[in-house]
Image: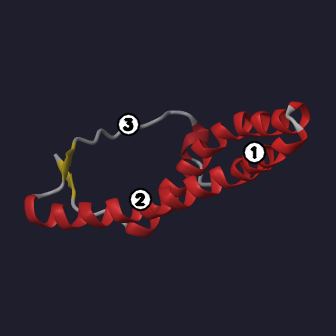
Amino acid sequence: MYSLRSVDVWSCAKIMGAIYGCLGLIFLPFLLWGGIGSLLFGRDSASFPGVAMLFLAILAPIFYGVMGFVMGAFTAWVYNLVAKRIGGIRLELKVEFSSSPSAMSPL
C-alpha cells in the first residue's frame, strides 16, 4: 500500500487549467450561436447583447482555464498541508507487464 504524500502545485495547476479551459470550450458554440443570432435576427437597437455574447464566447474558455489553474494550485497546496497532518490518500498500485514490443520501446 502506498500513500500520496504530496502533490506538485505547479503541475496540478497546469493540468486543471487545461481541463477547465477545455470545459469552457463546451459553451463556445452556444454563446456564438446566441450572439450571431441576436445580431442577425434582433432589432437594430439590440446589437449590444449580440456583441456581448460574442465577447463572452471568446472569454469563457480563457476564464475557465485561468480559474481552473488558480483553483488547481490552491487545491494542491491545501492537499499538501492536510496530507502532512493526517496522511495522504492511500493508493494500491499494481504493476502490469506487457508482452508487446512497442510498449517496451522508449519514446
Please give the name of the residue rendered at 37% of the width and 66% of the height, measured from the top-left corner: 8
Label 1: which secondary element? helix
Q: Nearer the viewer, residue 82 or 52?
A: 52
Q: Give the label, 3 or 2, closer to the camera.
A: 2
Mark 3 or mark 2: which comes first in sequence? 2
Q: Identify the residue under disc 3.
A: 96
User: Residue 47 appears at what percent x and percent y?
Assistant: 84, 45
Q: Nearer the viewer, residue 99 or 91?
A: 91
Q: Is residue 39 left or right of residue 53?
A: right
Label 3: which secondary element? loop
Q: Within 10 Å of the Cα at label 2, are there few (<14), some (14-19), or many (20+) other Cα atoms?
A: many
**Which residue type carries mark 3?**
Glu
Above or below 78: residue 37 = above
Q: Measure how far apart labels 1 and 3 are at the Cα level.
A: 56 Å
Q: Is residue 22 left or right of residue 40?
A: left
Q: Identify the residue under disc 1.
A: 49
Mark 2 or mark 1: which comes first in sequence? 1
Above or below 36: residue 79 = below
Image quarter for residue 65? Answer: bottom right
**Which residue type carries mark 2?**
Gly
Q: Measure how far apart labels 3 and 2 are at the Cα level.
A: 30 Å
